[in-house]
């Protein structure tokens, strides 16, 4: 689980999005950012989360939020995922887990008695000054937008 908490300075990062373009935390200076970490493109929970954010994108934008997703999938997988589900926000391809580790959302997980390294589904809301305003470690994939709005409106 993440070591970061509300009030901490968000770790600076740069990564490549689905188009091979560099995206950095500094690109969002002066804006509120919803930075969501998810395990894998095109899986049921991750698709539900991404589509919930997509379906409510205009509401989030009206409230002043930018969105950015991060997973260890490749840029090509992200491109396919974005196209398939018409996602309007960028996805960082963190294949080396650099951003994932900086945010403390990469580590040992267990499923069916097997231990493996993976992503802890986590969302950070970062304020205009680069400070973490809210951390969600128990993400409701089907109602994530409401979760965010209820907490930070």
Image: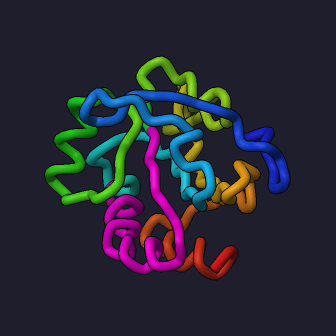
Residue 26: image location, x then y, percent: 58, 39
Seen from this angle, which residue lies furthest top? 96
Seen from this angle, which residue lies furthest right? 7
Residue range in magenta is 47-70
Which residue corresponds to the image point at 35% horizontal and 63% vertical from the top-left?
48
Q: Quadrant of the C terminus?
A: bottom right
The residue nearer to you, when weighing 31 against 119, is 31
Question: In the visual, does 150 lie left or right of 83?
Answer: right
Q: Main secondary structure of the magenta part?
A: helix
Residue 27: image location, x then y, percent: 51, 43
In the image, residue 63 lies in the stretch drawn in magenta? yes
In the image, residue 58 lies in the stretch drawn in magenta? yes
Residue 72: image location, x then y, percent: 42, 30
Which residue corresponds to the image point at 74% horizontal and 61% vertical from the top-left?
133
The residue nearer to you, when weighing 13 against 78, is 13
Q: Is residue 108 visible?
A: no
Q: Is residue 147 visible?
A: yes
């Amino acid at each position: 689980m993440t070591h970061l908490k509300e009030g901490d300075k968000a770790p600076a990062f740069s990564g490549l999005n689905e188009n091979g373009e560099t995206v950095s935390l500094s690109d969002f200076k002066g804006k509120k950012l919803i930075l969501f970490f998810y395990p894998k493109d095109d899986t049921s929970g991750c698709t539900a989360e991404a589509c919930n954010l997509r379906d409510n994108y205009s509401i989030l934008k009206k409230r002043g939020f930018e969105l950015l997703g991060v997973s260890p999938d490749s840029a090509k997988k992200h491109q396919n995922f974005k196209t398939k589900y018409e996602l309007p926000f960028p996805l960082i391809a963190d294949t080396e887990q650099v951003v994932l580790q900086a945010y403390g959302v990469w580590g040992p997980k267990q499923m069916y008695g097997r231990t493996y390294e993976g992503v802890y589904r986590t969302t950070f809301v970062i304020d205009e000054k680069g400070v973490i305003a809210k951390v969600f470690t128990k993400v409701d994939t089907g109602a994530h937008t409401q979760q965010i709005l209820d907490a930070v409106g």
